[in-house]
Image (cartoon, rainbow, N blue to C red):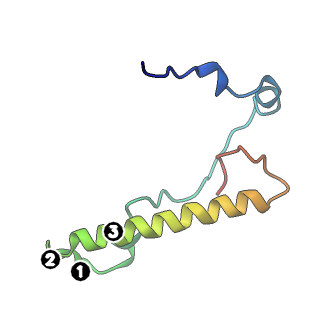
Amino acid sequence: MARTRYLYTTRQSYLYGAKHINDSFLNMGFDYKNKILIKGTSPKLWANPLQNSMYGTIETMITFILEEAKMIKKWMSIAHDKNNTNIN
């Protein structure tokens, strides 16, 4: 028998909702996912289709490093909630 996932156990608390009901996050930055190497390198590098998979792997690693840096930034900050995902 498969386990059922109860959504009420993952719901945010009412106190968190009351504190952040009026949050409007503007200017969250550039959406860099799958665009870092394309924007920063020459189009001649992307002309060879045999190397596109290698560039995709490098792109994934760079995106992972940036996301982990955001997590460290969030956990070291005293001004942000620890479960907040809106951090630049």
Answer with left or right where residue 25 lies relative to residue 59. Answer: right
Q: Who is closer to the viewer here, 32 or 81?
A: 81
Q: Quadrant of residue 14?
A: top right
35 to the left or right of 53: right
* Label 3: which secondary element: helix
Q: Earlier in the sequence, mark 1 or mark 3?
A: 1
Please give the label number shown on residue 48.
2
Count every numbered label the image shows and give the total. Answer: 3
| Disc nearer the start of the sequence (2/3) | 2
Give how far across and how far down residue 2 sits, in percent: 43, 21
The dot on residue 88 is none
Q: Secondary structure at mark 2?
A: loop
The amino acid beneath tag 1 is Leu
Instruction: Looking at the picture, tell me which residue is in the foreground, 69 or 37.
Output: 69
Q: Give the number of the disc on residue 57.
A: 3
Image point (24%, 77%), residue name: 43
Q: Amino acid at mark 3?
A: Thr
Query: Compared to 48, does 77 lie above or below?
Result: above
Residue 23, image x, y percentages: 73, 37
